[in-house]
Image (cartoon, rainbow, N blue to C red):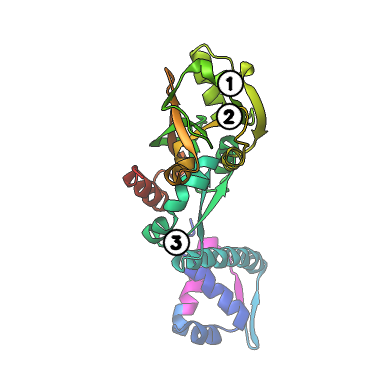
Amino acid sequence: MLKDFAKLGTFLTVVKERSFSKASKKLGISQPAVTQQIKWLEDYLDSRIVERKKNGITLTKTGEELYKIAMRLDKCVSSVEKEIIHIMNKELTFIIGSSFTIGNYVLPSFLNDIKEAINNDVLIQVDLTMEILQKLLDKKIDIAMIESPIFLDGIIYREWLEDEFVLFSNQPLPKVVRPEMLKEFNWICREEESHTRRVIAEAFEDAGLECKAFNVATTVTSPTAVVQTVLRAPKEGSQTVAIISKYTINDELESGKLHAAKIKGLEFKRSFYLAYLKERKHDAFIDKVVSFFMKKRKI
């Protein structure tokens, strides 16, 4: 098998310069060395590829076919060289895909540190968990960070952070809310396709509570919308509440803008996961990012 591409490079230079002597000067090697490399190719192909003439060289039919192949190979090598230069110059962007809560409320606190840790630019794309996993399978992102994973073939999942949902409102709540009180509230909920909503609904069902009995005032499509809707809810009449990840409202709880409580007899917990393709399990870049996040399991 022909693996020495340098000889093909010499052949291309001979064709371009139309002379063995000019090719040797161009390549910085002796003319006998050029002749030897061309002879090696001819011996390998068992056919003449170059005819020397007084006014230069001409290609045989085999030489013309080899020239077409060598030109295609040269273009491929040039393209690969450009990609390698991009990597060397840190011109590639490492793309993290994440579900909403992680992307909007957890990752921002890591962004500067991870850029420094891997010495590379980082881009975060936020979407629904299933969409993020599909992007991972389609190789549009390098790593996924998701809430309560959907297990798919070809993906490695690493458990990362523990998350807990809390009941919250823009008005004070008892430290522990009794389940029968839940029907008295106006509820802000995520859309039915949301994994967050499914986790909460399953926990209610396990406790014998039916979500259909709750007064759902508004349905929204992101954690940010949930928080902002509760913040702006009227403080007269029935109290407005929602259930959301503790990471989402840390700042508002500390400032007193929002108030949180637990529901008696109910515990809403889940794990955040890192996910990446099995075919990249030995990828040094992936390993560096995963190691970084696994060391930062407490925030």
- Label 3, secondary structure: give it: loop
The range drawn in magenta is 34-51
Residue 177 in the image: state x and y as whole percent.
46, 22
Q: Element at badge 2?
A: loop
Amino acid type of disc 3?
Asn
Pointers 1 and 2 in contact (CB under 8 A)?
A: yes
Left or right: residue 109 compared with residue 189:
left
Question: Which kind of residue does numbered mark 1 sit on?
Answer: Glu
Looking at the picture, how far across and down is residue 285, in whole percent? 41, 53
Which residue matches tag 2?
Answer: 239
Residue 202 appears anywhere in the view: yes
Identify residue for label 1.
184
Image height of 44 relative to 53, above or below: above
In the picture, the quarter occupied by the C terminus is: top left
Residue for badge 3: 120
Q: Nearer the viewer, residue 279 or 257?
A: 257
Q: Residues within 10 Å of mark 1 (few under 14, many from 20)?
A: few
Q: How many marks?
A: 3
Q: Nearer the viewer, residue 229 or 96?
A: 229
Q: Residue at x 44, y 82 (%)?
A: 29
Provide residue 9's location: percent of width, then percent of height.
53, 72
Q: Disc 1 versus disc 3: distance between alpha carbons?
A: 51 Å
Sequence-wise first label, 1 or 2: 1
Residue 178 in the magenta stretch? The answer is: no
Residue at the spot x=49%, y=70% of the render? 7
